[in-house]
């Protein structure tokens, strides 16, 4: 079935970039994105699933050890690659 939809220019550019990157048609990309969004359900459902993850991080270290590790691994930011 063919359906016409109207999208703003910035969204079309994003879809087109993704289509080129994945070597797929614009139609395939839009179809996949819509299917995924419908599979995930309303945003409120996604927020609930995200909240359910709170506190579920499994680690044998204590919170203090985790924080110490995070601080120890920080860098000054030098040598970072620019994001496109």
Image (tube, grey):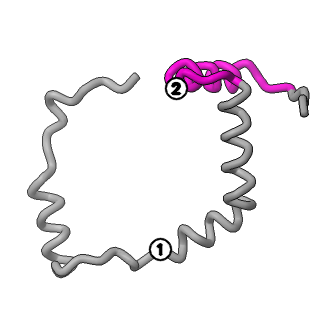
In the displayed structure, does residue 9 sit left or right of residue 6? Answer: left
The residue at which mark 2 appears reads as 22
- Residue at horizontal 67%, vertical 49%? 36
Instruction: Find numbered disc 1 in the image and state the secondary structure of the residue it sits on.
Output: loop
Distance from Cα at disc 1 to Cα at disc 2: 31 Å
The residue at which mark 1 appears reads as 53
Magenta segment: 6-26
- Residue at horizontal 14%, vertical 58%? 71
Compare residues 61 and 75 and report the one nearer the observer.
Answer: 61
Quadrant of the image occupied by residue 82? top left
In the displayed structure, does residue 58 sit left or right of residue 61? Answer: right
In the displayed structure, does residue 37 sit left or right of residue 64? Answer: right
Q: Earlier in the sequence, mark 1 or mark 2?
A: 2
The image position of residue 77, as x and y in percent, is 18, 35
- Residue at horizontal 13%, vertical 74%? 65
> Which is closer to the viewer, label 1 or label 2?
2
The image position of residue 8, as x and y in percent, is 77, 23
Does the magenta portion include 2?
Answer: no
The image position of residue 44, as x and y in percent, is 70, 65
* Magenta span: chief secondary structure: helix
Task: Report crowding for label 1: few under 14, some 14 to 19, many 20 or more residues within 10 A (C-alpha).
Answer: few
């Amino acid at each position: 079935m063919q359906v016409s939809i109207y999208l703003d220019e910035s969204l079309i550019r994003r879809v087109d970039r993704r289509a080129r990157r994945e070597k797929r048609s614009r139609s395939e990309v839009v179809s996949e994105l819509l299917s995924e969004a419908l599979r995930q359900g309303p945003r409120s459902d996604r927020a609930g699933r995200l909240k359910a993850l709170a506190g579920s991080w499994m680690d044998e270290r204590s919170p203090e050890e985790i924080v110490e590790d995070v601080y120890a691994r920080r860098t000054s930011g030098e040598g970072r690659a620019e994001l496109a």
